[in-house]
Image: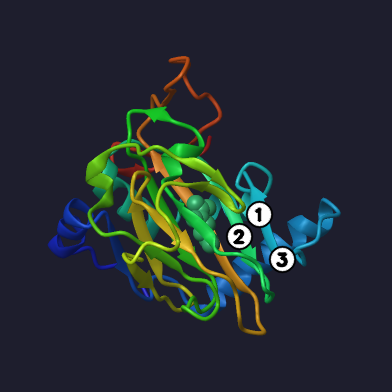
Amino acid sequence: MGLALHPQHHEEMRVKGFTIFPSVFSTAEMAELDKSLDNLASREGKSRDGAVVFMQRVAERCQDVKSFARRAELVAIATAFLGPDVDLYFNQHVVKNPGPQEAFSWHQDDAYGPVEPTPYLTVWVSMTESTTANGCVWALPGSWHHGLLNHERSSFGLSCHSLDDPDQGVPIVASAGDIACFWSLTVHKSGPNLTNTPRKAMILQYCRPGLRHKSTGMLISSRIPIARGGQRYEEV
Ligand SMILES: O=C(O)CCC(=O)C(=O)O
């Protein structure tokens, strides 16, 4: 598997605000991560069977996920886009089970908790196939250039662009082990899962150290160190 980072990835992040890394992890590695998340859910008495399940801050509670967030491939991506020092700001596992649930509204990740400096980097790891039929992510190319947009509450999260607008961006179709990277200002949505198997993703959000809440200026202290001086952070 492995990772090849090309000038095209930088160009796509600069122009469109997102880029894809195919086949970074194997299907077996994704199954292993899935098992760790399943074990965590069992340990905590939680179910992954709801329509859409969010398990947040799992790296803080599961060593396997924390180690995964420091995989060499992810350190390479995060340091390429953010510089040599990187922290994990936020992470969540999302399961979209089959069902007639709504689409996840068009939004910017920054809208859920404005921070400075912005944008940070969202690394969306596809743990299963992600298709237009099972609720893949869609992105609006170039949208990150407009800064933080006004968001309104919708029936499924915050919304900054209508699901009825003729411009519905582009789908990010992925296989298990592919990665989609986007800025926290890139406008994106995801659709319902109209198939009969779950769609799963691990979302890792990386930032430079020193991230602060925009509203209060307070340092966000709960970050996990990922890389220092371009090298993976080793716990002592
Ligand atoms: O995994 C998904 O469906 C996307 C979720 C999403 O857009 C987000 O967490 O910001």
- Judged left or right of residue 223, residue 44 is right
Could you say where residue 129 lies in the image, as x and y percent from the top left? 51, 79
Q: Which residue is mark 1?
A: 54
Question: How far separated are the C-alphas under marks 1 and 2?
Answer: 5 Å
Residue that appears at 61% across and 74% down: 31
Q: Which mark is residue 94?
A: 2
Q: Is mark 1 within 8 Å of ligand 1?
A: yes
Residue 196, by quadrant, is bottom right
Q: Which residue is mark 3?
A: 51
- Tag 3 or tag 2, which sits nearer the N-term? 3
Q: Secondary structure at mark 2?
A: strand
Q: Amino acid at mark 2?
A: Val
Question: Are the residues flagged by discs 1 and 2 in contact, CB closer than 8 Å?
Answer: yes
Q: Secondary structure at mark 3?
A: loop
Could you say where residue 201 lies in the image, as x and y percent from the top left? 55, 64
- Judged left or right of residue 86, residue 90 is right
Q: Quadrant of the N terminus?
A: bottom left
Which is nearer the eye, 99 or 30?
99
Question: How far separated are the C-alphas under marks 2 and 3?
Answer: 11 Å
